[in-house]
Amino acid sequence: MWTNWAGNQRADTPIARPSSIAELQQAIAQPQSLRVLGSGHSFTPIVAGGDRILDLSALNLPTLGDVEDGRVWVNANARLRDLSPALGGKGLAFRNLGDINAQSLAGAVSTATHGTGRELPCLAAEITAARMVSASGDILTTEDIPLEMAQVTLGMLGVLTEAQISVVPKYNLRRQVNLNSVQDSLATMHQKWAENRNFEFFYIPFTGKTVEIRHALTDAAETKAPRDLDMIAVKVLKLARSAGKVSEGLRGALLKLLTMAQSDEDYVGESWRVLCSDRRIPFKEMEYHLPPDVAGDVLQEVLTRLHRDHKDIYFPIEVRQTAGDTACLSPFQGGRRISVAIHTDASEDHQRYFDAIEPLFVEAGGRPHWGKMHSLTYKNLSTMYPDFDRFCALREQVDPDGKFLTPALARLFRP
């Protein structure tokens, strides 16, 4: 049985592992519907629902191809955590990365996965050309499909095998972490995004405190990486939640100890080592991308509802910003967006919390992260994206039988 990282998506579907492009073409040309799995870091039913599942981890493609004019061809099904050191070996790097780098490149770009940085776009925007295998088993490129259609697809136009991406010279980042009040973070977040290459913050529930993280380019030498205490912090937050069922005072005392133990951090390292973290405690996540001018008001209301109605929640709320791009299905199409992500324990019911917060995001003009949980349908989504129907028309053209379209995806991309 296949399960995703969080354990909330499962499939008993047979898994095939082609080892060559020819085998992949033969597999795709079969009439049954299919989906391709990456690393399972999406929370939505992107893999489950087809008659077959393809695992491309054994595909015989070089990790990196030729480098030319700041662009390099890569195996789209390689993991980001493997691509980064391979690029580093050639003196190159991704311009930006998200917090988790366990995903395959294909999975990350197909869902518009992103990091943070006011002038830094999502990973899909770095694609300058692509090759994929169509529903008929033929090879398609971005000479056949417009680039802005091929950058973010949820795997519905074809199976992405290789991508040409923009890269930059290898660089170091200085990471600075500090504790702040949530009200100060909300009041100064726009200024901090303007002043820092990367900026984000996490609100620690029921503490009134945030953890702020900044990254800056530096020529300084690498320093020793600090101990990763995130897993311990999450366990303390869970313990405090449990204690709160007995005594709110005890919960408050534990949370106060946790924030007092939070120490400032100042660390220099190679970009991908600084940007990315290990997440070993599974969770479920909803993330919406909001217009910057309304994000502060929405966040205030999210906190109000959290404090009033959801005292069982202990996972932090993450706030980031991403530059705009032109991809048709990118949540960042047309301009910058501020992303707000809420989480629950993977083993606990998320429905009440997510159902209470999602309407705030939608009413404010938010767009959902394609790999994270939401309740929207075609009717909602078709009004959120200027080119949504144009993409759907192309999808019908290249895959008229819906080979890559599961029932869950059909609810999103068919009227």
Image: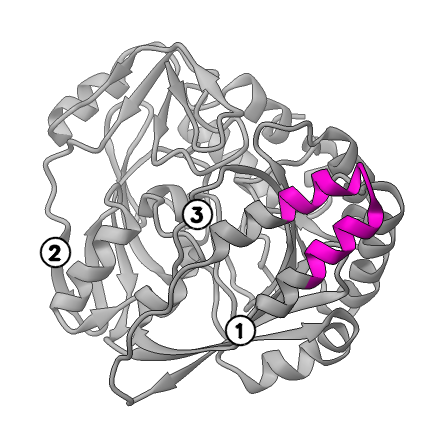
Asked if 359 appears above or below 40 in the picture, the reply is below
Quadrant housing the C terminus: top right
Q: Residue at x 44, y 38 (%)?
A: 41
Q: Amino acid at mark 2?
A: Gly
Q: Alpha carbon of mark 2 to alpha carbon of mark 3: how far?
A: 30 Å
Residue on which the image places disc 1: 263
Q: Residue at x 45, y 57 (%)?
A: 99
Q: Amino acid at mark 3?
A: Arg
Label disc, if present, on residue 279 of the rendered structure: 3
Q: Position of residue 289 (x, y in %)?
A: 65, 55
Q: Main secondary structure of the magenta part?
A: helix
Q: Alpha carbon of mark 2 to alpha carbon of mark 1: how far?
A: 42 Å
Comparing 47 with 301, the one in front is 301
Label disc, if present, on residue 65 of the rendered structure: 2
**Residue 246 magenta-drawn?**
yes
Q: Quadrant of residue 286?
A: top right
Mark positioned earlier in the residue sequence (3 or 1)? 1
* Observer able to see residue 113: yes
